[in-house]
Image (cartoon, coloured by chain):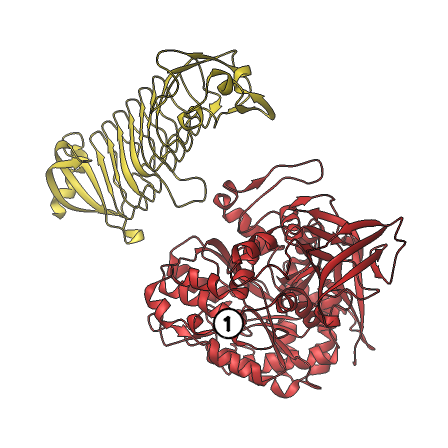
Amino acid sequence: MELLIRNGFVYDPINSINGEKMDIAIRDGKFVQKVNEFSARKIDASGMIVMPGGVDIHCHIAGSEVNTGRLLRPEDHFKDFERKTLKTRSGVGRSIPSTFTTGYRYARMGYTTIMNPSMAPLEAKHTHEELNDTPMVDKATYPLLGDWWFVLEYLKDGAIEECARYVAWMMTTTKGYAIKIVNPGGLEAWGSGRNVSCIDDQVPYFGITPREILRGLCKVNKLLNLPHTIHVHTNNLGKPGNYLTALDTMKCVEDLSSEGKPAIHITHCQFCAFKGSNWRSLTSGAEEIAKYVNNHSHVTLDMGQVIFTDTTTMTADGPFQYTLYELTGNKWVNHDVETETSSGIVPFRYRRKSYVNAIQWSIGLELALLIEDPWKIFMTTDHPNGGPFVYYPKIIAWLMSRKAREATVQKINQRARSRSLLPSIDRELSFYEIAIMTRAGQAKALGLVNKGHLSVGADADVAIYNINPETTDPSTKYRTIRKTFRNAAYTIKNGKIAAKNGEILEHVKGATMWLDVQVSDPIKVTEGMKRRFREYWTVEYENYPVTENYLEISHPIAVKADV
Amino acid sequence: MISLHPQKEFVFPIIAEGINPDVFQDKNRGEIEELEIWEGNKQKKLGELFKVKETGTEPQQEDIAIVIYGDLSRVRRIGAWMKGGEITINGNVGMHLGEEMEGGKITVHGSVGGWAGSMMKGGIIEIHGNASHYLGAAYRGSSQGMNGGRIIVHGNVGYEAGAYMRKGLMKIYGSVGQFAGFRMHNGTIYIQKDCEGRVGACMKNGKIVVAGFLESVLPTFTIESIRKKVKIGEDDVAEGPFYRFLGDLTENGNGKLYVLKEENPHLSTYERLL
């Protein structure tokens, strides 16, 4: 099928195209130089913005913790449901929508690639089953490896290459995409009811430090030539004064970056940019973090913006969720995933009038605005931890309009208002910068070769928004921005028109991307390893790997490793 | 006044959010008959299931009164989210009556199903028969229960009446099942007859008055004093003497549980702790 998008204002930051009027041609799911003008289906995008399909680097949309969250919160589904139509399936959910609804809602906003950031390897099958059922988007998932016993043991012995071979095995076995590290060492400590307090604290029994885990896995990442960097949720997340831990985490891998390439991705950075010694004296550490990131090229971040609404927090960071449970007294799920990780879920409401929540809201935006290079910071809400992803248009409006920020600042807690840096920041992002923060930058950081740009040969994922950049001034018309980005005029997935003005036209299935890491000497699954499974896991080794036929549409990405 | 009469005996559940004075406002008979209503998995017109009659004054009056006759025990969500007006039901009615209502009045001359007045914010529900479980409770999983208004039941009530209640008054002239006032945050529940037990479990605050027999008080409540009378709502007083318990201590709660001394001689052992 051929498709021709005509006369749109094209924003394609990877190819440095900034709002030029041009035509985009698509054939058989790929961008091409040109198509037959007479026979191709034409979309008139005059007066509209054409961008590559959105990419979300971090959103919890599938897996055991998401599903447990769904079970925990019937009241979350009660008020928000979608009836089935001839094209779509029914679904429920506000902060944790069911899988199909997740796909449809992302497609309506013009997103076409999303990354599920935390998969306990033991729950890989469950995660992939849910990803199979998430339509409209291409997706991938990151296995949690920071507290896996194998990793801890080899790093303890300093056997980086051996560790790398095991990580490669795990990546292929669980069909993962990147190394996710959550509260390194802390989750293992949580198994015995403890936590680590800084990156040089010792992990019980293993006797190594979070610093060694971070550096070790960063080296492993480099040895394996993985497309993304290590994806890190820092220690001490959600504790006042933790911006120092975040800075330490970034600094500890400073020397491991080569050729100015990023070596570490600090995710939902808002939650680890708290300054102050307690909740009362909490202020923003965004300035310090932004200063560091502006002067270094080895870090990328995502925002983890807070939205004032009712949501469900879920992370693999068991000790942090316990703290949150103690703060709120709300219902709580706690889980220790055997030898791999932990997990926790607590429903939470971010309130405008709460000092802490208002400061958190401010920190997210401060980070995005104070970090000068949009290729280093990406827009996320850490869905659903900071708020459901359907609020992205609201964040875009805040980023593009000082007036929109001021309107919200007027409504937040008074003490937080007087301490917030936001009123002093004049920066307003352009459509070009928004395109970087929401698609191009994320695709580049993820190492997705065929996503996030409109070059010939790339996957034909396009989002068209009905707004004219020549006649609309985003800084004053922030409500229009919000409305426009809520429902893309057209979302094109694999060359098919998937959604139009908020209506799903076609139920397109997305592929699951995973890394086929090729090492020269792959590990052999020995009897000894199987015995360990029998001793330490609740599943036998034979039931553990996710085979390729488990994935509905499998898209392996071959990676040649240096070991 | 608008009256509704079922056209047949209902077999499938009817979801009737449309039967609501706010919806009927400014509509004539024809328009009301065209309102959408679900019968099982089929969408129907209100006129297909109910015979609509207009009686009395013109339909443009300030507060619309709706009167329904017949057995509605399969009809759910009548008066949900209503803000004003009046509904009178002569017969039994199904689940979710007056859910999240904010104002107005619902009177039932019959019994009601579960979740009546759940999460209501204002208005009055008066039930002359029995009410089933979860009267004025929060939706499953939610911690936002009844948040205002009044519920008066002249018959008996099932389990978990007033669960997660935050505000308002519940007066029950019959008996109640277990877990009345479960996880209550505030508000008042008055029970004139017997109470099956576990009353006030996990309550944080608020007031529960039991004027009938209560077999045992949860061990996580402590006796505080004996009171001659208790104020119920703004203008009512229950004559005692009552044992006053505080709890639920497992939740660091400060809820007040009053139990009538006269009906509960077996609780006199608590007196030595005073």
Q: Where residue A137 sits in the image (x, y, percent)?
A: 71, 54
- Residue at 66% x, 79% y is A262
Q: Is residue B208 left or right of residue A120?
A: left
| Residue matched to label 1 | A189
Residue placed furthest toward the front: A471
A1 to the left or right of B205:
right
The image shows residue A283 at horizontal and vertical percentages of: 39, 73
Residue A209 visible at all: no
Picture coordinates of residue B21 (x, y %)?
40, 25
- Residue B84 lies left or right of residue A184; in this view the side is left
Q: In the image, is residue A74 above or below residue A347? A: above
Packing grade of label 1 (10 A; few <14, some 14-19, many >=20) is: many
Front-most of residues A218 and A335: A218
Give the camera-side residue of A45 and B173.
Answer: A45
User: Which chain is painted in yellow?
Assistant: B
Give me the chain that's red: A
- Label tally: 1
Is A448 drawn above or below residue B188 in the view shown? below
Nearest the camera: B204 or A506? Answer: A506
Instruction: Please indicate, yes or no, whether residue A549 appears anywhere in the rendered image.
Output: yes
Q: Residue furthest left?
A: B228
Q: Nearer the viewer, residue A92 or A554?
A: A92
Quadrant for the C terminus of chain A, please.
bottom right
Q: Amino acid at mark 1?
A: Ala
In this rendering, the answer to whether B85 lies above or below B198 is above
Disc 1 secondary structure class: helix
Query: Residue lying farthest bottom?
Result: A255
Marked residue chain, label 1: A
Q: Quadrant of residue B155?
A: top left
When the figure is inspected, residue B97 is found, relative to residue A160, above or below; the finding is: above
Tell me where residue A421 appears, x and y as whole percent. 42, 73
